[in-house]
Image (tube, rainbow, N blue to C red):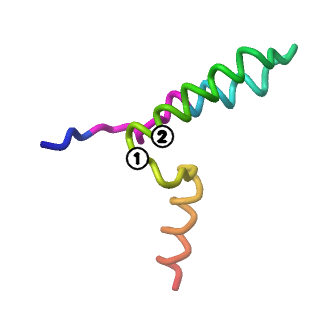
Amino acid sequence: MEKTSDKPECALEALDLLNCVAQSPFDQDKCLRLMQVLRDCVLNKKVKKFSLAEQGQEANQSSKKA
């Protein structure tokens, strides 16, 4: 039985890593740990590709115009 979720797989891990990279001062050790957490999530949940919500919305809008 598959579980359904409103959030994409590994979304929180990816967001944590992006926010870490954007922080000042940059904490490389923390970001490396978060990158490993994200990598583990991707492998465990067999994620193949990430996309941004805006990209999907733009694709939907352009297909409606055609």
- Name above or below for residue 15 compared with residue 49: above
Nearer to the camera, 52 or 45: 45
Q: Position of residue 24 (x, y in %)?
A: 85, 16
Q: Residues within 10 Å of mark 1 (few under 14, many from 20)?
A: few
* Mark 2: amino acid: Val
Q: Tell me: 5 left or right of 17.
A: left
Q: Position of residue 22 (x, y in %)?
A: 78, 26
Name the outermost residue toward the bottom: 66
Label 1 secondary element: loop
Q: Position of residue 34 (x, y in %)?
A: 62, 23
Residue plotted at (58% across, 53% down): 54
Residue plotted at (55% across, 53% down): 51
- Name above or below for residue 39 compared with residue 48: above
Q: Is residue 28 magenta?
A: no
Q: Tell me: 22 left or right of 25.
A: left
Q: How crowded is mark 2: few (under 14 residues within 10 Å), some or many (20 or more)?
A: some
Q: Where is residue 15 in the image (x, y as percent from the top left)?
A: 59, 30
Residue plotted at (56% across, 74% down): 62
Nearer to the camera, 47 or 6: 47
Numbered tag placed on residue 42 in the rendering:
2
Residue range highlighted in magenta: 5-13
Label 2 secondary element: helix
Q: Do the residues labelled 1 and 2 touch (CB within 8 Å)?
A: yes
Counting labels gives 2
Question: Label 1, label 2: how many angstroms apart (C-alpha)?
Answer: 6 Å
